[in-house]
Structures are given as C-alpha cells and as structure tokens.
C-alpha cells in the first residue's frame, strides 16, 4: 500500500475521532472514570468500563491513536498539522496538545514495585484480555492480584481523558486545514467535556 499523504492522514484522523466518539460506550456514557474523596479524606478512584463489547469497540477505535506507526498516531497527526501552518500561535497550540497527550499517557502508578503508565495499562488490558491473550501480559495482570483494578482505572482514564484531547486536536486540525489560525484561548480545554 502506498504511503498516505499528510492530508490523507488528517482526513483519516478526523474520521477516526468521530467514529471513536460515536462508539456506544462513549456516546451513552457507560465508560467513565471519577475520583472522589472518601470519608477519611483519601482519594477513591472509580471507573466503569461498560460491558465487554463496549470496551472492545472503544479500545479498538482508540488503539490507532497510541500505536506508533499508525497514520492516526497522535505525534504523527501533530507533525502533519504543524506542517500545514506557519502561524506561530497555532504551532504553539499543537505543541501544547501533543505535550498534554504525552503527559496523559505517562500518568503512572506504582504497582507491586513497578511503575505502570496509562498507555502500558491500555496495552496490558488490550493485549492480555480484550484483543489477544498474550501470555506475558496475562501473567503481569494476574500477578497484580488485588491491585488489578488499578490497571483498569488507568486504562479507562487514558481513554476517557484521551477522547477529550483527541476532540480538541480534531477541531484544531479542521481549523488548520481551513487555513484559519488557532489561539490557545479559542479552544475548549481538554479537561472540558465536548
């Protein structure tokens, strides 16, 4: 297959974000995360990853944004979008979104002495449970014992917060492709539901 042009990659990205947001688990809000403060003042992470088919559908759609080498891989999309604009402010916005994306995927927790990032949690769940039954990933998940729900929380958080960031990036891509400059204050921040 011929290598896609930057324009084709951006078309594919816009379509992929729209399809991800239209997955039942996200559209109907059955996949979500919350953080509450418990009675003793401790943070209590909670998540709902919907039913198995909702989770599988959302993870399948999300996978291309975190898989290096895919045309919808966020750093690839950011580079392609940056190449289409000479506007310094727009370039700053794109760089900030790429940094926020990297920070989101790098969120980590120490589990059984090992740091597990959000993207690693996504891969553990995806390839140890949802898509494949990779023996090493299953072994890692099993070894976590009662800490196993933390991996699900990290995975679900990456997806839920990631969708918000992807939505903002999609809007920036659309503006840049239309030849319009983007200012940081023009955007709804990624922490706002869209």
Image: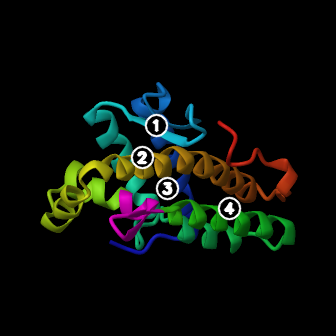
Counting residues from the start of the chain, the first of labels 1 and 2 encountered is: 1
Let me know if residue 16 appears in the view. Answer: no
Q: Looking at the image, which is closer to me, 176 or 75?
A: 75
Residue at the image point whose x is 37% and y is 71% from the top: 114
Q: Residues within 10 Å of mark 1 (few under 14, many from 20)?
A: some
- Give the image location of residue 135, x and y in percent: 12, 64
* Residues at marks 3 and 1, CA–CA distance in whole angstroms: 33 Å
Residue holding disc 4: 97
Query: As drawn, is 79 to the left or to the right of 119?
Result: right
Write down the region rendered in magenta: 109-121
- Give the image location of residue 187, x and y in percent: 79, 48
Q: Is residue 112 magenta?
A: yes
Counting residues from the start of the chain, the first of labels 4 and 1 encountered is: 1
* Residues at marks 1 and 2, CA–CA distance in whole angstroms: 7 Å
Mark nearest the camera among 4 and 2 is 2
Q: Looking at the image, which is closer to me, 181 or 138?
A: 138
In the image, residue 96 above or below residue 126: below
Residue holding disc 1: 46
């Amino acid at each position: 297959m011929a290598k896609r042009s930057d324009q084709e990659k951006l078309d594919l990205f816009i379509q992929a974000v729209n399809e991800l947001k239209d997955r039942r688990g996200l559209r109907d809000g059955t996949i979500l995360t919350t953080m509450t403060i418990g009675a003793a003042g401790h943070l209590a992470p909670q998540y709902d990853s919907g039913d198995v088919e909702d989770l599988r559908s959302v993870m399948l759609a999300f996978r291309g944004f975190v898989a290096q080498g895919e045309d919808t891989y966020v750093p690839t999309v950011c580079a392609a979008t940056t190449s289409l604009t000479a506007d310094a402010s727009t370039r700053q916005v794109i760089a900030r979104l790429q940094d926020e994306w990297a920070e989101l995927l790098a969120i980590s927790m120490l589990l059984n002495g090992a740091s597990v990032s959000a993207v690693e949690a996504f891969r553990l769940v995806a390839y140890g449970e949802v898509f494949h039954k990779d023996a090493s990933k299953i072994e890692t998940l099993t070894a976590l014992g009662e800490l196993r729900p933390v991996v699900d929380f990290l995975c679900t958080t990456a997806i839920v917060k990631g969708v918000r960031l992807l939505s903002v990036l999609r809007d920036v891509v659309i503006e840049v492709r239309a030849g319009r400059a983007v200012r940081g204050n023009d955007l709804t921040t990624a922490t706002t539901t869209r």
